[in-house]
Image (cartoon, rainbow, N blue to C red):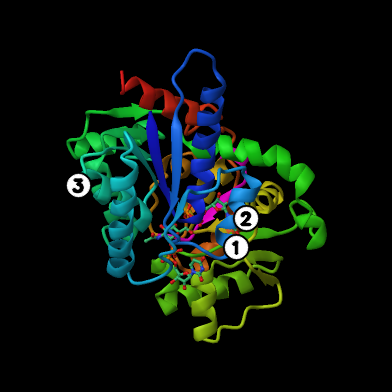
Amino acid sequence: MKITTIIGARPQFIKAAMISHAIAAHNQLVGYAQIEEIILHTGQHYDDHMSAIFFRELDIPEPKYNLGIGSASHGRQTGQMLMAIEEVLLKERPDWVLIYGDTNSTLAGALAASKLHIRIAHVEAGLRSFNRLMPEEINRVVSDQLSHLLLCPSQVAIDNLAAEGITKGVSITGDVMAGALQFAATRASVHSDILASLGLRPQGYIFATVHRAENTDNSQRLENIVSAFASLNEPVIFPVHPRTRKFLKERGYKLSENVTLMDPVSYFDSVALETSARFLLTDSGGMQKEAYWLKVPCITMRDETEWVETVESGWNVLAGADHDRIVNAVRTFTAPMEHLPLYGDSESAARCLHALLESCE
Ligand code: UD1
Ligand code: UDP
């Protein structure tokens, strides 16, 4: 079986690493047909600390193709990806295309494969924010409609798909990021010295990230977030996404002294910072789950989330981009007594691969 994995953005490298590891484990088994995986990197993310560093840390095989598309408006970026992915797929003719999550690379991969009648497996299918102003929501809805195998992290995702009439090829596998976190957590304790290098003590800081278009492109929302950080009266470690850095610079925002602004960190450093943080303040999808798995309280600076179970559990609080709601959420948070397992475990990637192999029988 030949698979083409299509990835391009930071969280997709982390997710794809787990499936690549599962494929490598499968290929070690005696008596089973080999799986050939060809990795195609669209080049959506390209800075070393947004891309190559994840390949190094997570032992991801070198992409056979890097399209080098880079940054552009949605239409231009997705269109350029579509053209270039089509060329590769015509040459490679894989049995399956594997897509991840909800970025423009996901959408371009789904469109290119479906027009060539190549089967598509979508890892992290069925997530919905029900907010069509988010580019990610458009990418998910279209990608799910075009996919033949929908690998879902939760029952909620399955229900979301059923509500859109998608029931065929749907499978509950758990979330592949659960395994990635476990993989990184053991290594981070040996390979990451980020806490020492920043002079941090466990529970002595808040870890923050911001990158959603709705928060960065809207100057009032970004200003509210930055002013909430200033009101927290404790160290805020803020590895800033290049999108956010661009807007902070353009608008000349000054961050207060309690905020440490730095370049994006590696995955091991991110996991180390998350593990010992008092709180996570984020608009990231992946980090809401990581916070939950690590039992670190999360304040999500969005108006809604796809990861509704984390909010229902009481470990995640939606605070929008509102100064008072963010600050009050940090001041008044009480950890729930209960912490139920959510979104699978370290075997989620193996379950995805199993579902893929089964659907070929
Ligand atoms: C993208 C995804 C988002 C995902 C995020 C993960 C879409 C529509 N959005 O958002 O769903 O959560 O990745 O991080 O696909 N830039 C750099 N260097 C880089 C990459 C980006 O400087 O290596 C800057 C450029 O100015 C670029 C901006 O960041 O215009 C935004 O990058 P882009 O990939 O378009 O979207 P993200 O905000 O990263
Ligand atoms: N992350 C990282 N370095 C950072 C910030 C985040 O490695 O400086 C990791 C984080 O631990 C999580 C993933 O990147 O695993 C989340 O990616 P991002 O927030 O960019 O995208 P989203 O999950 O929102 O799509």
The amino acid sitting under disc 2 is Ile
Helix, strand or loop for disc 1: helix
Q: Quadrant of residue 8?
A: bottom left
Residue at the extreme top:
31
Residue topped by disc 2: 53
Tag 1 and tag 3, C-beta contact below 8 Å: no
The quarter of the image holding the N terminus is top left
Q: Which mark is residue 271?
A: none
The amino acid sitting under disc 1 is Asp
Mark 1 and mark 3: span between their CA atoms?
A: 33 Å
Residue 162 location in percent, x, y? 22, 34
Front-lying residue, 260 or 180:
180
Helix, strand or loop for disc 2: helix
The amino acid sitting under disc 3 is Lys
Q: Dot 3 surroundings within 10 Å: few (below 14), some, or many (20 or more)?
A: few
Where is 234 relative to 110, above or below?
A: below
Q: Quadrant of ligand 1?
A: bottom left
Mark 3 and mark 2: span between their CA atoms?
A: 33 Å
Magenta part of the chain: 293-302
Q: Is residue 315 visible?
A: no
Dot 2 or dot 1, earlier in sequence: 1
Residue topped by disc 1: 48
Left or right? Give the position of 140 relative to 321. left
Residue 87 location in percent, x, y? 30, 53
* Residue at (43, 78) in percent of width and height: 220
Q: Which mark is residue 115?
A: 3
- Is residue 297 within the magenta segment? yes
